Amino acid sequence: MEKQINWLDILIRCRNNLQEQIKPLLKTLDQLQPKLGIGAGGDPIKQIDLVAERAIVNTLKEHEISFTLISEESGIEKYGQTPHDNYVTLDPIDGTTNLVRGIPFYATSIAISTRPTINTIHTALVTDLVHSTTYTAQKGKGAYCNNQKTAPSKTKFLETAVVGIDLNTYKAKKTARKLTNLIQKTKHIRHLGANALELCHVADGTTDAFIDIRGKLRTTDIAAAWLIIEESGAKITTPDGKPINVKLSPKQKVAFIAAANQKIHRVILNLMRLEKEIE
Ligand code: IPD
Ligand code: CA
């Protein structure tokens, strides 16, 4: 029989080890970095990504946990005797460009599930590595920020809202066209460069919505934040308003609309539908 694992405790230990291991590297980022090839998610691998990933894997191994790793860097790897008992979906550093360029906004994202599917995620952690803010969630138990229960904003109108939109793509023309009405109506638009963390900001009421309809984001980036959003009571769906029901894989892409509450989610969806009709 599989031993009982206190996943929340394990994820905190993973985070602590990662923070410890990347500390020396943060001081050498201005030096020439080794070329390490392309990661499973399709981006060039940085040394700090690999060190962060190893810190997580080593912590799990130290606790004799069997698992299948689904990582943006190393792809899919199996550990222990029963690797299909647990799936660990990992983005060791979300916001690598920010980190490398010295923009203080990047995170680690870890999700634990019983199958390689988003809707079987039961425990999640996203840590803001600059401000030492940790978001956690367990299925059915709410979302927490530094151990305090967290809730999204009650903002209902775009006219007073802060909305994040990721337009980071060479296909910006096509994507932006679908969002013109929304951009025009929204009081404040943001994109900070670490999507897992930006989703947590919707969960804790810092912002009112976060939208990424590029179809470019990997499920490894969103897995943990998905549960944190769901458990906070905020809403996250596909751009068509359907539940997000995707496979967890470094290659699987995802598009979404996350919003603080049903009302503002509907406002955003309706504006995007309007745009579609005009196309
Ligand atoms: C990136 C960030 C960024 C988003 C990119 C992602 P990474 O994650 O979340 O905000 O625009 O699409 O790839 O590559 O730093 O883990
Ligand atoms: Ca990453």
Image (tube, rainbow, N blue to C red):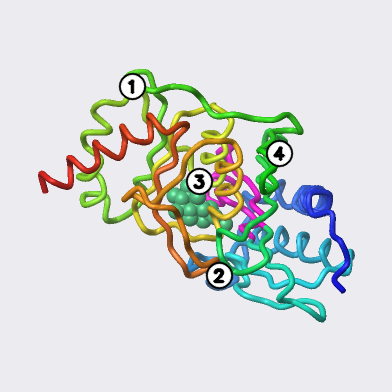
Checking the image for residue 134, the label placed there is: 4
Residue matched to label 3: 195
242 or 52: which is nearer to us? 242
Does label 3 point to a residue whose CB lies under 8 Å from ligand 1? yes
Q: Point out the quarter of the image occupied by ligand 2.
A: bottom right
- Name above or below for residue 24 compared with residue 163: below
N-terminal of the pair, mark 4 or mark 3, is: 4
Residue matched to label 1: 187
- Decide if residue 239 is on the left or right side of residue 146: left
- Whether residue 129 is visible: no
Furthest residue to the left? 278
Q: Helix, strand, or loop for circle 2?
A: loop
Tell me the quarter of the picture where residue 103 sits: top right
Instruction: Give the CA distance from mark 2 to mark 4.
Output: 26 Å
Foreground label between 2 and 4: 4
- Name above or below for residue 158 compared with residue 83: above
Q: Is residue 178 magenta?
A: no
Q: Helix, strand, or loop for circle 1?
A: loop
Q: Which residues are magenta?
A: 90-111
Mark 1–mark 2 CB contact (< 8 Å): no
N-terminal of the pair, mark 4 or mark 1, is: 4
N-terminal of the pair, mark 1 or mark 2, is: 2
Residue matched to label 2: 39
Q: Helix, strand, or loop for circle 3?
A: helix
